[in-house]
Image (tube, rainbow, N blue to C red):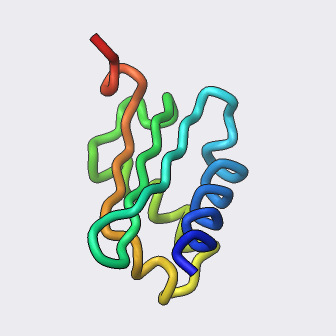
Amino acid sequence: MREVLKQKIHDTLQTGYFSDIKDFVDVSDGAADFIHVVVVSRKFNGYTMKGRGDIIWEELLKHLSDEEWGHVSLLIGATPEDVQIW
């Protein structure tokens, strides 16, 4: 069930709002039965961390049931500049 949900979350974001070839979506295991979601996109330019999270939640809430999105415990939205590798 967890792997199916992780794939659904990934596909929902990657084929929806974050479908640009340069957008990056990572869905991974969190503690217990929770899931972590990280999205890197230039679409976050100009948004606060809260605003970025709101964009991701809005997309997930369109496609996931209450039970499904209740398994997401961490959302991070970042721009490519936020995650530059030194």
Q: Nearer the viewer, residue 6 or 19?
A: 6
Q: Residue at x 27, y 69 (%)?
A: 31
Q: Quadrant of residue 24?
A: top right
Residue depicted at 58% across the width and 73% down the height: 5
Q: How many marks?
A: 0
- Say left or right for 58 vs 53: right
**71 on left or right of 60:** left
Q: Which of the 4 image quadrants contains residue 72? A: bottom left
Position in image of residue 71 (x %, y %)? 41, 78
Up the image or down, 42 lies above or below 17; here it is above
Q: Where residue 81 sits in the image (x, y, percent)?
A: 35, 20
- Image side of residue 65 versus residue 55, left or right: right
Name, please, the residue furthest toward the right.
15
Front-most of residues 34 and 79: 34
Q: Is residue 39 left or right of residue 16?
A: left
Q: Residue at x 41, y 47 (%)?
A: 38
Picture coordinates of residue 25, whole percent (x, y) = 53, 44
The quadrant of the image that shows the C terminus is: top left
- Against 78, residue 29 (above or below) is below
Q: Position of residue 4 (x, y in %)?
A: 63, 72
